[in-house]
Amino acid sequence: MRAAEFAAVLARTKTIPLEQGFQWYPYDTLASLLSLAPLLRMHFRDLARAAASGPMLDIGCGDGDLALFWASLGSRVTAIDNPPTNYNLMKGIRVLSGRLDLPVEIVQMNVDSQFTLEGGTYGFALLLGILYHLKNPYYVLETLAQRVRYCILSTRVATETKARTKIGHEPLAYLLDHREANDDATNFWIFSPAGLRRLAKRTGWRVIGDTLVGCTRHPNPVDPDKDGRMFMFLESQRLSIPAEVKLLDGWTEVTEFNSAWTLKEFSIEARVLDNSKPSRFFLGFSLMREMVADTPVTMFCTVNGVQMKPQTFKQSGEHFFESLIPDEIGNTDTLCFEFTVDHRYKPETDPRDLGVIVPFTRAIHGISENLTFWLG
C-alpha cells in the first residue's frame, strides 16, 4: 500500500521533465518490490531486523526511487551510483530528492573499482539489477560483507546457455560477449543459480532465502524472452558471530508453527564458536494483542549476572530485545542470558505463567536464528 502511494507521488513528480537533453530512467524501479514481496514476507523477521540495525545503502540507485521510498519510511539512506553509467548522470535522483524534500545522502562512486564506504556499519544494502553490470562482482560483495549486515540482491541468472548446455546445478558463470545481451556493453557475468549461491558464500554471506522470477523455465544469458532474475536475501557472516545456543529453564514445547512460549522467567546459554567477543545481541520474539491491551510489556535481562537496561514494548507483533554486551563481561566463550517478563496477561486456558512467544523461523537452526550476535 505504501509503495503504491509513493509510486503515485513519483509519477506526478516526474511529469515535470528534467533539464533539456536528459530524461528520467525509463523503467519502474519500485516494481522490484513486487518481485521481492514473497521472499520478504517469508523472512519478515529478518527484514525487520535489517531495517532496525543501521542506515541503508542503495547501490546503483538509478533515479533513486527505492532510496527515496525507504527515506519516506524514516530510514537513513545513502544512494550510490556512477554518473558515467547512470541513465541521466544522476541528475534524476538529485532533482527528485529536492522536489520531494527527502533526506537522502547522494554519493558518486564507481563500485567496480577499489572503493571504500564512509561511516560505520550499515544495516542493509540494496544491490538490485547491478551485479551483472560489474566486472568485479566478487570484490564488491566481499567489500560489502565487511560493512553491511544484510543485503537484498537481484541479478540475471541462467540455467542453460543459448546452445542449451545445462549449467543450473553447477557453480558457474557465463561471460557475455560485447553487446551480446540487450545490446549493452556493460553486461558481463551471468551466474547460474548454484554459481550465485557459491559466490555469496565465498564472499562472506549466508543466504537467508532466494527466489527466481521472470523466465523460470530454462533461462539463458542472452535471449530477451529467457531473462530470469534471482532475488536473494543475504546476511553478512563477517559481521555476525556463530554460536551454539541451548535453551535452559523457562521454555514450553515447540508448536507445529515452529514457535514456543517462554515462561515469565527464562534463560538461554550461548557458546561463541570463535575467538571474537560480540559487542551486541538481539533476541527476536512476538507479543499478542491481548498482552499489551492494558499495560506495556517490560523485559529485563542479565548477561553473566550483569544487568542490562530494561526495555518496554507497547504494541503487539514482532519485536527485538537489543543490547550492547558490557565491557565488564570478558572475552568468554559462554554467555548466559536470563530474561524476566513483566506483564498482566494470563490466558484462561493455560495455567502456566507465560511470558513471550519466540518464533523458530528456521527450525533446523533452532533458537540460533533468533538470538544473533554482532561485531561492531
Image (cartoon, grey):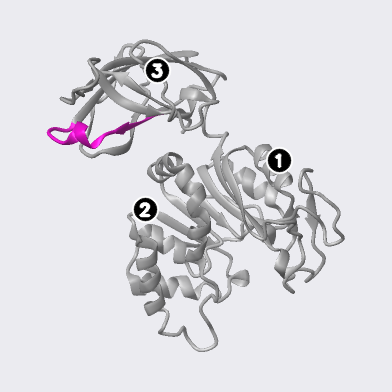
Relative horizontal placement of residue 236, taking residue 291 as reference (left or right): right
Percent x, y of residue 114: 65, 52
Percent x, y of residue 36: 51, 54
The structure residue drawn at horizontal position 45% and vertical position 85%, both measured from the top left corner, is 17
The magenta segment: 281-296
Kind of residue at disc 1: Arg
Q: Residues within 10 Å of mark 3 (few under 14, many from 20)?
A: few
Which residue is tagged 3?
253
Q: Earlier in the sequence, mark 2 or mark 3?
A: 2
Which residue is tagged 2?
75
Q: Earlier in the sequence, mark 3 or mark 1?
A: 1
Kind of residue at disc 3: Glu
Mark 3 and mark 1: span between their CA atoms? 36 Å
Kind of residue at disc 2: Ser
Q: Nearer the viewer, residue 3 or 180?
A: 3
Taking the view exactly as shown, the residue that stands out farthest to the front is 349
Which residue is tagged 1?
198
Q: Earlier in the sequence, mark 2 or mark 1?
A: 2
Q: Residues within 10 Å of mark 1 (few under 14, many from 20)?
A: some
Percent x, y of residue 304: 36, 12
For residue 78, above or below residue 12:
above
- Position of the N terminus by quadrant: bottom left
Residue 292 forms part of the magenta stretch: yes
- Labels 3, 1: front one: 3
